[in-house]
Image (cartoon, helix red, strand yellow):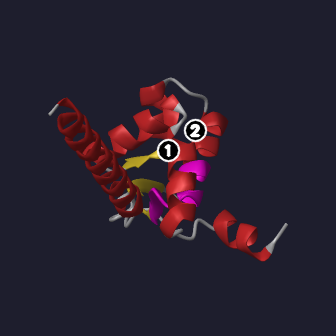
Amino acid sequence: MGQSERSEDKGAPLSGRHSVDHTLAALADPIRRQTVELLGRRSRRAGELASALGLPAPAMSRHLRALKQCGLVEEKFSECDARVRIYALRDGAMTDLKNWVAATEQLWSDQLGALKEHVGKRRE
């Protein structure tokens, strides 16, 4: 295992193209998308997420690990009980993905605009 892979295992946030690739890979799974939607409403314990999604605890743990590794989710500890982990969406976690989508959308818009202009000139 390479050095960069080891740091990802610890849930370190990624940046740039690497982040977009990992984010899209994580969100390709419907359970992970549902998890992100639930966490978008409020922070939750793993058990709450598992119950809401109808999953056994080990499966939920695997999904949460994948979401942490790509930097979408962060783990916090309850103020009342340090053994209780609370999962929340990481602030700004989708910034790279949003920027990529915006740039891609602009590229397509520019290309379609150029095609429209080209077709318009050929009809004249």
Real-space Cα separation, disc 2 to disc 1, in angstroms: 7 Å
Where is residue 76, by image quadrant?
bottom left
Q: Which residues are magenta?
A: 65-76
Q: Earlier in the sequence, mark 2 or mark 1?
A: 1
Left or right? Give the position of 21 relative to 119: right
Tag 2–tag 1 contact (CB < 8 Å): yes
Looking at the rendered structure, the secondary structure element under dot 1 is helix
Residue 68 belongs to the span the image colors magenta: yes
Q: Identify the image quadrant of the N terminus.
A: bottom right
Q: Nearer the viewer, residue 117 or 83?
A: 117
Residue placed under numbered mark 2 in the picture:
60
In this view, 2 is above or below 61: below
The amino acid type of the residue labelled 1 equals Ala
The amino acid type of the residue labelled 2 equals Met
Left or right? Give the position of 12 relative to 114: right
| Residue lying at 55% horizontally and 34% vertically, measured from the top left | 29
Q: Furthest residue to the right?
A: 1
Q: Identify the image quadrant of the C terminus.
A: top left
Q: Nearer the viewer, residue 54 or 11?
A: 11
Disc 2 residue crowd, few under 14, some 14–19, many 20+, Cα 10 Å: many
Q: Nearer the viewer, residue 73 or 4?
A: 4
Rendered location of residue 69, percent (x, y): 59, 59
Left or right? Give the position of 83 relative to 44: right
Looking at the rendered structure, the secondary structure element under dot 2 is helix
Residue 4 belongs to the span the image colors magenta: no
| Residue lying at 44% horizontally and 37% vertically, measured from the top left | 33
Where is residue 37, by image quadrant?
top left
Where is residue 98, by image quadrant?
bottom left
Disc sitting over residue 46 in the figure: 1
Left or right? Give the position of 88 relative to 18: left
